[in-house]
Image: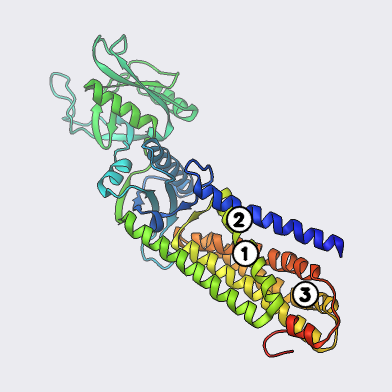
């Protein structure tokens, strides 16, 4: 009994420390563990883009979308957006048109046009070969700007870095701002092959579909370095270098929809969620104590520890909380209560058979465990399926719900059981049934 009470004391102290950590970390402005809220609670902008994958082989669509997500994420991080969420998703299973989409959530950014600019200003860089046809070159040897070009597969997706230079031997001009780009290994090999096989031919360099430079390939360039000279002003060249270094889009994207949630609306939703959670906990606590007496008090303490542990996990993982996520958390509290109800009802049945509190507790937990286990495993499987196949909104619900179910199962079986064991062993008398029974059973 001493060991059990010592363990119960340790669990109680750990619960109190966990609650203190959660409370204190919110009081300190410089806390390293703040709660992270989604757009619907913090306010911000939600953008949905459609990616054009028509020029990508089916087997490479997944890799291209992953690259697109990484590029956009780097770009919004460059502008100091706090905790951006960038995700890719396919159109719905039952949608007539199958398409790849990019979901961008920017907390704190309520200027829609600013958000669009953060994404849309990223350039698409392409290198294309001139296709010789009659009329493309005039009598003086000048290239017709309407001439057709052939894709080479060499794009900004293969770019490693870009730097700004002024003039030099590459351009013949001492004060011209030029952009020097270095390709990665794959890009360097492709660039070397193109320049080797097309010496003497012009190569068009396109930025967002516009021809900005049309140099002639004089010789093979094996080192993977290209010079873009487009009569840039220094500021223009500097901006281009910045954009290329922080993400040349591997795929064209088209804005489908925007949604802006004001900070005041998000704060209102958060406040309502907190009130709903506290009110729900209060009602549940009153019911448990009224109906189950001493075990009900134990369950309330156990639930309090459960809530503190969940809030700590939200901070440490960290979990981005949305309104749907808060709903999943509150629902998991209901499952935690359900587990305690199963246990206490089984205990009541054992007490009716004349057993003392110790035997009733052991038998009650033993009989309730299978039902608790099967019910919680079913809920966890459901949460995994929702998280795997759902959209970002559904994933927020599934994540908090799944974590909550797992933690609630542990607290119900371990914490509640330990606390009830620590209360001691009492014979089956009327006073015992009064405190350890339930409902109208005395």
Query: Of circles 1 and 3, which is in front?
Result: 1
Q: Which residue is located at x 27 percent, y 24 percent?
A: 237
Q: Which mark is residue 365?
A: 3
> From this viewpoint, is residue 313 visible?
no
Please give left or right for residue 403 compared with residue 348 in the image.
Answer: left
Dot 2 crowding, Cα within 10 Å, few <14, some 14–19, many 20+: many
Confirm or deny contact between disc 1 and disc 2 (CB under 8 A): yes
Locate residue 392, reporting x and y percent. 45, 58
Name the residue that disc number 2 marks.
19
Q: Is label 2 in a helix, a strand or a loop? A: helix
Dot 1 crowding, Cα within 10 Å, few <14, some 14–19, many 20+: some
Q: Which residue is located at x 39 percent, y 29 percent?
A: 245
* Alpha carbon distance from label 1 to label 2: 9 Å
* Alpha carbon distance from label 1 to label 3: 20 Å
Q: Which mark is residue 304?
A: 1
Q: Earlier in the sequence, mark 1 or mark 3?
A: 1
Q: Nearer the viewer, residue 169 or 139?
A: 169
Farthest front residue in view: 431
Q: Is label 1 in a helix, a strand or a loop? A: helix
Residue 98 in the image: above or below residue 186:
below
Residue 287 in the image: above or below residue 210:
below
> From this viewpoint, is residue 8 visible?
yes
Locate residue 247, reporting x and y percent. 39, 35
Please give left or right for residue 127 compared with residue 222 in the image.
Answer: left
* Alpha carbon distance from label 3 to label 2: 27 Å
Q: In the picture, residue 139 is in which quadrant?
A: top left
Q: Earlier in the sequence, mark 3 or mark 2?
A: 2
Q: Earlier in the sequence, mark 1 or mark 2?
A: 2
């Amino acid at each position: 009994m001493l060991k059990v009470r010592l363990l119960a004391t340790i669990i109680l102290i750990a619960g109190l420390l966990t609650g203190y950590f959660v409370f204190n970390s919110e009081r300190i402005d410089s806390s390293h563990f703040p709660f992270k809220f989604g757009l619907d609670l913090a306010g911000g902008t939600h953008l949905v883009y459609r990616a054009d994958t028509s020029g990508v082989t089916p087997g490479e669509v997944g890799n291209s979308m992953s690259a697109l997500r990484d590029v956009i994420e780097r770009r919004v991080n460059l502008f100091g957006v706090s905790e951006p969420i960038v995700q890719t998703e396919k159109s719905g299973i039952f949608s007539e048109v199958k398409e790849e989409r990019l979901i961008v959530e920017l907390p704190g950014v309520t200027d829609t046009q600013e958000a669009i600019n953060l994404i849309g200003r990223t350039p698409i860089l392409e290198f294309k070969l001139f296709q010789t046809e009659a009329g493309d070159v005039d009598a003086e040897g000048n290239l017709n700007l309407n001439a057709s070009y052939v894709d080479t597969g060499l794009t900004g997706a293969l770019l490693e870095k870009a730097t700004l230079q002024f003039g030099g031997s590459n351009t013949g001009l001492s004060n011209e701002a030029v952009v020097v780009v270095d390709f990665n290994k794959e890009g360097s090999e492709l660039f070397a092959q193109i320049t080797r096989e097309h010496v003497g031919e012009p190569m068009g360099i396109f930025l967002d579909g516009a021809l900005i430079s049309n140099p002639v390939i004089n010789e093979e360039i094996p080192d993977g370095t290209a010079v873009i000279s487009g009569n840039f002003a220094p500021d223009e060249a500097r901006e281009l270098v910045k954009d290329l270094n922080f993400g040349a889009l591997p795929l064209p994207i088209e804005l489908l929809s925007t949604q802006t949630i004001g900070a005041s609306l998000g704060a209102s939703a958060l406040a309502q969620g907190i009130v709903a959670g506290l009110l729900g906990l209060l009602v549940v606590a009153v019911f448990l104590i009224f109906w189950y007496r001493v075990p009900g008090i134990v369950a309330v303490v156990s639930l309090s520890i459960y809530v503190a542990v969940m809030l700590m996990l939200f901070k440490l993982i960290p979990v981005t909380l949305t309104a749907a996520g808060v709903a999943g958390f509150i629902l998991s509290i209901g499952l935690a209560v359900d587990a305690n109800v199963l246990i206490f009802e089984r205990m009541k049945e054992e007490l009716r058979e004349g057993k003392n509190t110790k035997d009733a507790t052991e038998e009650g937990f033993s009989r309730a465990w299978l039902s608790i286990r099967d019910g919680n495993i079913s809920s966890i499987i459901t949460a995994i399926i929702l998280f795997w196949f759902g959209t970002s909104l559904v994933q927020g619900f599934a994540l908090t719900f799944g974590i909550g179910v797992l933690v609630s199962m542990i607290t119900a079986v371990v914490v509640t059981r330990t606390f009830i064991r620590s209360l001691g062993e009492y014979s089956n008398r009327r006073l015992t049934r009064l405190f350890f029974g339930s409902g109208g059973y005395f």
